[in-house]
């Protein structure tokens, strides 16, 4: 029997708090789960620094990847023998679902920004490079790793396959909303996924939803909206993220200026030098990063040691609302005042912005280019969701941006009384 | 401070005005591919490389009053026109940014249609492949756009010409 068709003699199941069970029958999937590059995802938290705000949010990208796989598996069970669905693509979909986040590193968001990396590049490199994952995929067929990479990269020819993992109502989003809600303990993020899965139908280029399932989709979109603002963009989480980024900036700055670290930052060297090889990337996980932060808290460099101590001990920056339009001049003044007070504004005065677009649909001539959610009407016509749903229409294309200004209040309080301190306080809290 | 915003502002200043969001997206991507250090992250979307970050940053620049966005009704679709405001010029005075010269490249891109820039940016997205593979890939992922052989030839010429310009 060809490897692609090999089945385990007995189905394996992973107990899962969100989907109850994750079922594995394909030998290929079982082998991929056991690959070191996939096991590495156990050591990378799904929500990065959110655990400082929601102490339950310690779940990993491993959990989420299995969850996405399970949702796609259930969708494909429903698709079997339906028009427009080619079951030959089944294993490809399952592998792409399982591996879609494989290239995420520790605290991806900050690392990518500071070191100008792209986790999707690393996903591609792991899938196509000299790795265990590549060996397993290559046993299916010579071009199978490339196909998996193309699906994840959204450049695969069959857009229906791509849309299962990457669209406005895909398995990725359906898993992370529910999983993140579960682990953070918030009451948002819940929707009737079973109902949505039952009403999904394969079409030529994308998955559509039977019109009878519209209200379940409305619920899904609202929970996405709420999760973004209540969990993902939480200002305290962003404070930790700001400090984390500044630690990485400072460490790189020191390295570039020949600073002698007490502990040689061996795991970071290729990051500092801007030449990150796959083997170096795979060695860096959150345990390693936190070890360095712990050690750097005792470094001679005051900024690095302060930032690391803040991060490790959750001694975060305070924040105020910041209207960047109206307060640009104040920001510039604060920048100078911080300098005057000996508080380096490059590290201690940070504007952070968050924004999300809960749902948008394609309008001819506009370039948002998000694939809209389509409803399959009883007449077999396909209609864009926001044309049918008042709730979705109300939030379609509505962007919400939030700017906050972060700073260490303890440093400001510790300043000697005088004009500089008074001015800083006046601008920040007027 | 706001270094990424400042880089984009420099682009708008050099462009005088940009018409069309899709064109804007593709122009920044192509410049990025020519080595101009824009930091907005791009992914492959329906119409080729697309950056959500860029969309959000443009919106921020509008909110800041640094650029103006004029929505024009073109009967069956809307078109957006972007220009630097006096506030934007003031911001750039306070936040000088050094970027490699890009005026010539901007000028030739502005003359092209967004469809053509979509083709060019898609080809550049696959620049790790051979010429034959790039064309094959474009025909696969852009089936519906039906790019002609001549358009592909023109796009290759255009890419060649871009590398010689500033």
Image (cartoon, rainbow, N blue to C red):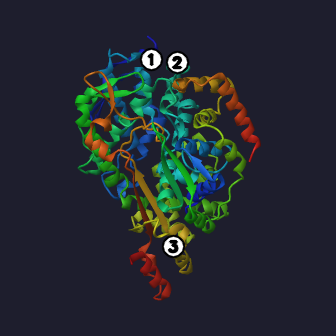
Q: Nearer the viewer, mark 1 or mark 3?
A: 3
- 10 Å crowding of disc 1: few (<14), some (14-19), many (20+): some
Q: Which residue is mark 3?
A: A329
Do labels 2 and 1 touch, CB within 8 Å?
yes
Residue at 63% in and 56% down: B13
Q: Chain of mark 1?
A: A
Residue at 41% over, 66% down: A316
Q: Are marks 2 and 3 in contact (CB under 8 Å)?
A: no
Q: Position of residue B146 (x, y in %)?
A: 56, 23
Residue A49 visible, this orientation: yes
Quarter holding residue A61: top left
Looking at the image, is mark 2 or mark 1 earlier in the sequence?
Answer: 1
In-image side of A278 versus A355 (left or right): right
Q: Where in the figure is residue A408, as x and y percent of width and height? A: 44, 72
Residue at label 2?
A141
- View extreme (bottom): residue: A418
Q: For the residues marked 2 and 1, what is the alpha-carbon distance in whole angstroms?
A: 8 Å
Is A381 or B54 nearer to us in this picture? A381
Q: What is the quadrant of the C terminus of chain A in the image? A: bottom left
A162 vs B131, left or right, is: left
Confirm whether circles 2 and 1 share one chain: yes
N-terminal of the pair, mark 2 or mark 3, is: 2
Label 2 or label 3, whichever lies nearer to me, is 3
Residue A216 in the image: x percent, y percent?
Answer: 24, 36
* First in residue order: circle 1 vs circle 3: 1
| Chain of the residue displaying label 3 | A
Q: Secondary structure at mark 3?
A: helix
Location of mark 1 (residue):
A4
Query: Compared to A298, does B63 lie above or below?
Result: above
Evaluate whether residue A194 shows in this view. no
Q: Secondary structure at mark 1?
A: helix
Measure the C-alpha gap from mark 2 to mark 3.
60 Å
């Amino acid at each position: 029997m060809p490897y692609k068709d090999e089945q385990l003699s007995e189905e394996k199941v992973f107990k899962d708090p969100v989907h109850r069970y994750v079922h594995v029958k394909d030998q290929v999937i079982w082998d991929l789960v056991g690959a070191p590059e996939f096991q590495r995802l156990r050591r990378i938290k799904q929500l990065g620094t959110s655990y400082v705000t929601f102490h339950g949010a310690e779940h990993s990208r491993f959990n989420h990847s299995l969850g996405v796989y399970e949702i796609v598996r259930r969708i494909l069970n429903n698709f079997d023998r339906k028009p427009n669905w080619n079951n030959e693509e089944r294993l490809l979909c399952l592998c792409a679902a399982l591996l879609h986040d494989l290239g995420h590193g520790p605290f991806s968001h900050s690392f990518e920004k500071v070191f100008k990396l792209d986790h999707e590049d690393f996903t591609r490199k792991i899938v196509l490079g000299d790795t265990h994952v590549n060996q397993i995929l290559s046993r299916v067929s010579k071009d199978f790793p490339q196909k998996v990479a193309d699906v994840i990269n959204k450049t695969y020819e069959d857009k229906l396959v791509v849309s299962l993992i990457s669209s406005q109502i895909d398995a990725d989003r359906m898993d992370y909303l529910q999983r993140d809600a579960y682990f953070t303990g918030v009451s948002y993020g819940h929707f009737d996924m079973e109902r949505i899965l039952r009403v999904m139908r394969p079409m030529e280029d994308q998955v559509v939803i039977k019109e009878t399932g519209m209200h379940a989709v409305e619920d899904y979109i609202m929970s996405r909206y709420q999760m973004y603002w209540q969990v993902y963009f939480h200002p305290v989480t962003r404070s930790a993220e700001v400090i984390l980024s500044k630690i990485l900036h400072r460490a790189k700055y020191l390295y570039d200026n020949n600073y002698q670290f007490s502990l040689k930052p061996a795991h970071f060297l290729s990051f500092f030098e801007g030449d990150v090889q796959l083997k170096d990337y795979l060695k860096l996980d959150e345990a390693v990063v936190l070890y360095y932060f712990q050690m750097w808290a005792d470094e001679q460099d005051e900024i690095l040691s302060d930032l690391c101590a803040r991060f490790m001990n959750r001694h975060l920056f305070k924040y105020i609302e910041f209207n960047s339009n109206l307060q640009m001049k104040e920001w510039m003044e604060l920048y100078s005042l911080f300098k005057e007070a000996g508080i380096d504004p490059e590290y201690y005065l940070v504007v952070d912005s968050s924004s999300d677009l809960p749902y948008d649909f394609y309008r001819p001539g506009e370039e948002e280019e998000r694939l809209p959610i389509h409803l399959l009407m009883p007449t077999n016509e396909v209609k864009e969701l926001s044309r049918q749903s008042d709730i979705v229409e109300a939030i379609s294309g509505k962007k919400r941006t939030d700017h906050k200004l972060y700073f260490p209040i303890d440093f400001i309080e510790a300043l000697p009384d005088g004009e500089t301190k008074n001015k800083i306080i006046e601008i920040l809290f007027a | 401070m706001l270094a990424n915003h400042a880089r984009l502002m420099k682009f708008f200043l050099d462009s005088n005005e940009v018409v069309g969001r899709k064109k804007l997206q593709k122009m920044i991507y192509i410049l990025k591919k020519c080595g101009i250090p824009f930091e907005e992250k791009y992914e492959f979307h329906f119409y080729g490389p697309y950056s959500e970050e860029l969309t959000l940053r443009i919106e921020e620049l509008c909110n800041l009053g640094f650029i103006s966005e004029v929505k024009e009704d073109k009967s069956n679709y809307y078109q957006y026109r972007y220009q630097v405001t006096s506030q934007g010029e003031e911001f750039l005075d306070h936040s000088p940014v050094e970027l490699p010269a890009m005026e010539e490249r901007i000028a030739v891109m502005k003359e092209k249609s967004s469809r053509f820039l979509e083709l060019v940016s898609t080809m550049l997205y696959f620049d790790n492949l051979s010429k034959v593979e790039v064309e094959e890939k474009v025909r696969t992922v852009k089936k519906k756009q039906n790019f002609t052989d001549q358009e592909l030839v023109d796009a290759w010429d255009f890419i060649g010409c871009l590398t010689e310009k500033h």
